[in-house]
Amino acid sequence: MRKTSLAALFVLFARPALAQDATQPVPAAPQAVTQAPANPQMTGPRILIATSMGDITLQLDSARAPKSVANVLRYVREKHYDNTVFYRVAKGFVIQMGSWDAKGKGRGIHPGGVPLEANNGLSNLRGTVALGREDAPDSASAEFYINLADNTPLDHKADDPGNATGYAVFGQVTSGMDVVEAIGNVPTGDNGPMPGQAPVTPVVVTKVSLLK
């Protein structure tokens, strides 16, 4: 609405000058400035993901995704993620980690899922982190992914008044996006839970720790 109004005002003010002197060139209409999508600033704890390809720091948002953040921190404290791998690399889409080791063995997760918090005002933009889940809305566990691109189709749907659609964003990469991109470009094969999307050479998550 703001961009349309500015253009309309410009036309209104340009017309008198055009009427006074038809020989003057008509000023070009101002070009609309396209703003890149952005999330609100996130506040809360930070975690460090140490990998065989480098470190990644995440800023979590405990204000907008309190249940999702508490869930991930519980797994961090239990060292659930240590010596697992990024088992999914979907090029140009996401990289994903959680409960699988380099030998393709899965780790046990806590019973019961995390209540979906997709309707929290955060979007699946490049560099954001969100919980993976099954078809049921409240089925997320330890798995989470990092967006390699703006993946807004993964967001909460506008026609959903509650929390039944989308994937809950709970954090943002603040350091190590170059590592994320490098992981997102490794060769992939079938040796993992996601056929065709498993790194040929395992990308090991050596440790995930809470930063002070």
Image (cartoon, rainbow, N blue to C red):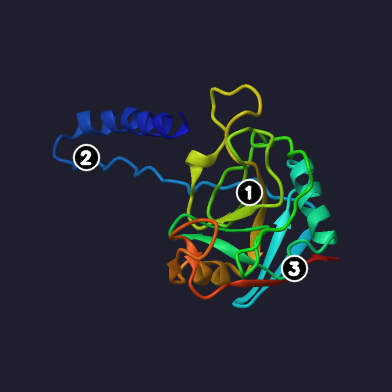
Q: Amino acid at mark 1?
A: Ala
* Residue 4 in picture, x, y percent from top left: 40, 30
The structure residue drawn at horizontal position 54% and vertical position 71%, both measured from the top left corner, is 178
Question: Relative to residue 108, is residue 129 drawn left or right?
Answer: left
Image label count? 3
Which numbered disc covers residue 82? 3
Is 212 rendered above or below residue 53?
above
Mark 2 is surrounded, within 10 Å at the Cα level, by few (under 14), some (14 to 19) or many (20 or more) other residues, namely few
Is 121 rendered above or below residue 183?
above
Q: Nearer the viewer, mark 3 or mark 1?
A: 3
Q: Amino acid at mark 3?
A: Asp
Q: Which residue is mark 2?
A: 26
The structure residue drawn at horizontal position 85% and vertical position 60%, both measured from the top left corner, is 77
| Lower sequence index among marks 2 and 3 | 2
Question: Relative to residue 208, is residue 101 drawn left or right?
Answer: left
The structure residue drawn at horizontal position 15% and vertical position 34%, both measured from the top left corner, is 22
Which of the two residues, 108 or 44, is positioned nearer the viewer here? Answer: 108
Q: Secondary structure at mark 3?
A: loop
CA gap, disc 2 and disc 3: 65 Å
Q: Secondary structure at mark 1?
A: strand
| Lower sequence index among marks 2 and 1 | 2
CA gap, disc 3 and disc 1: 19 Å
